[in-house]
Each structure stands twice: as structure tokens, then as C-alpha cells.
Amino acid sequence: MTENGRPGPPHRALALLCAVAARPLARAGPYRIRRVLELLRRGARPATAEQVAAARHAVVTASARCAAARSCLPRSLATALLCRARGVWPTWCTGVRTEPFGAHAWVAVDGAPIGEPPHETGYTPVITVAPLPRGP
């Protein structure tokens, strides 16, 4: 990170690459997204809240598209991809709520959403791709 809180050029480039890679994945169906993420999480350590927050910040700083309010799916996918590029994996989630009706995608650590604004709460997870348990 630089002094102004923005990722440095190498980290920004990697975050932008992850945002670009997330775009076609976001257009895929739920089954394909889940399968791709399940494959990618293999061999990664569980991410900490700090690691996920830093990845999310890098993604929204590098990509205006991922920073947009209605871009939760590509933003969450890009964040998960960036975490994986750094050797860790968050829990990636999609879910719905009924009052008011909405769908949302986010990343979490230990069940707590990371970087989500207060109004984006109350979703029931439908698909989650959590880190794999580490062997002894």
C-alpha cells in the first residue's frame, strides 16, 4: 500500500487482472461459478478478515466497475480471485432476502461479511464456497 492507502502498482495490476477475469465468470450460471470456485480454492489457506478486507479494497480501487453499487457479483468474485492469487481463500457467498426482496454476493470470514455496507444485511446464503479444512 502507498501512503494514501491505495495499493501500489504491482498490487493494483493484479487486482485489475482479477477484476477482468471475474467478468466472464460473473456471466456464467450458478453451477459453473460454484464449480470454478471449488476448484480454485484447493490448496489455499483460510483467509483472515484483514487479508479479505485488503483484497476487497484493492479490487474496488483498481476497478470502477467492481466499485459500482450494483456490481456485487463481479466484486465478490474478483475479491475471491485476488485472495486466491495471494494463497488464501475467503468464504464466497450468494444469497437472497425477502424484505425488501433482493439478491447479493459477498465474501466473508467466519460467517461475517467483509466490507459490506450496513444496508446490505439480512441475506440468507444460498451458495457458499468456503475454504477447505487444512490437513493435520
Image (tube, rainbow, N blue to C red):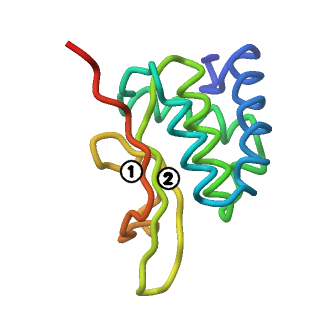
Q: Which residue is mark 1?
A: 113
Q: Residue at x 65, y 26 (%)?
A: 6
**Could you tell whether 103 is left or right of 13 in the image?**
left
The label number, if any, that marks residue 106 in the structure image: 2
Please determine whether, in this image, residue 29 is positioned above or below residue 61. below
Q: Position of residue 108 (x, y in %)?
A: 39, 45
Amino acid type of the residue tagged 1 in the rendering? Pro
Placement of the C terminus among the 4 image quadrants: top left
Amino acid type of the residue tagged 2 in the rendering? Trp
Determine the image quadrant of residue 17. top right
Count neighbours of disc 2 (C-alpha within 10 A) and say few if under 14, some if 14 to 19, many if 20 or more.
many
Please determine whether, in this image, residue 121 is positioned above or below residue 79. below
Task: Give the camera-side residue of 59 and 92.
Answer: 92
Count neighbours of disc 1 (C-alpha within 10 A) and say few if under 14, some if 14 to 19, many if 20 or more.
many
Determine the image quadrant of residue 79. top right
Please determine whether, in this image, residue 83 is positioned above or below residue 8. below
Q: Position of residue 114 (x, y in %)?
A: 42, 45
Placement of the N terminus among the 4 image quadrants: top right
